[in-house]
Amino acid sequence: MQITIQTDAGAPTTLIDGPDRSLNKIMGPVGFSVGSVTDMQPRKSIRGTNAKPTDRGNVQNSFTMSGARKCASDAAALSWLLGFLTTCPRNNTIKFIEGATIKTLADAVLQISGSRKGSILFLTYTITGGALS
């Protein structure tokens, strides 16, 4: 399964590449879990002076998963991890892609944590959003 988050510029950022174990690919998802809550109130995202109400259809879904990325060197791994953690969008549309099937989670919030062991990176994602479409 490939998982991406849309950027404001329109180009997606890949969170998980699927089972591809090639160099510089994020293999996963591992430990994929899903939680769901109903009867939720609309939330508000506050960005500076703008408030953006988001109606999640009275449903909140949470997805937690991990992935691993093998880099060419320890230095390349550290550089990529620091860049990814600071530039990856944290609030936008998430797409779960499996073959020809695409499920979308609009106005999702992404939390990322990462660690490094040598040239291998371990990433953990928590995604929260409304109903899948």
Image (tube, helix red, strand yellow):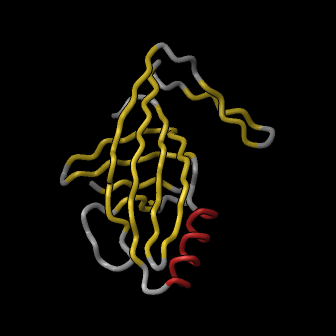
Residue occupying the far right of the picture? 49
Relative to 110, is 21 on the left or the right? Answer: left
Q: Position of residue 6 (x, y in %)?
A: 47, 54
Residue occupying the far left of the picture? 99
Q: Where is residue 80 in the image (x, y as percent from the top left)?
A: 54, 75
Frontmost residue, 68 versus 85? 68
Q: For residue 17, what is the image quadrant? A: bottom left
Which residue corresponds to the image point at 44% horizontal and 34% vertical from the top-left?
62
Residue occupying the far top of the picture? 39
Frontmost residue, 101 versus 37? 37
Relative to 41, is 27 on the left or the right? Answer: left
Give the position of the N terminus as an image quadrant. bottom left
Say if 38 sits above or below 56 in the image. Answer: above
Q: How many marks?
A: 0
Q: Position of residue 124 (x, y in %)?
A: 47, 53
Residue occupying the far front of the picture? 117
Say if 37 sits above or below 103 in the image. Answer: above
Which residue corresponds to the image point at 36% horizontal and 41% vertical from the top-left?
104
Frontmost residue, 64 versus 12? 64
Which residue corresponds to the image point at 58% horizontal and 21% vertical from the top-left?
42
Give the position of the C terminus as an image quadrant. top left
Relative to 121, is 34 on the left or the right? Answer: left
Q: Position of residue 121 (x, y in %)?
A: 46, 69
Relative to 46, is 17 on the left or the right? Answer: left
Which residue corresponds to the image point at 48% horizontal and 44% vertical from the top-left?
126
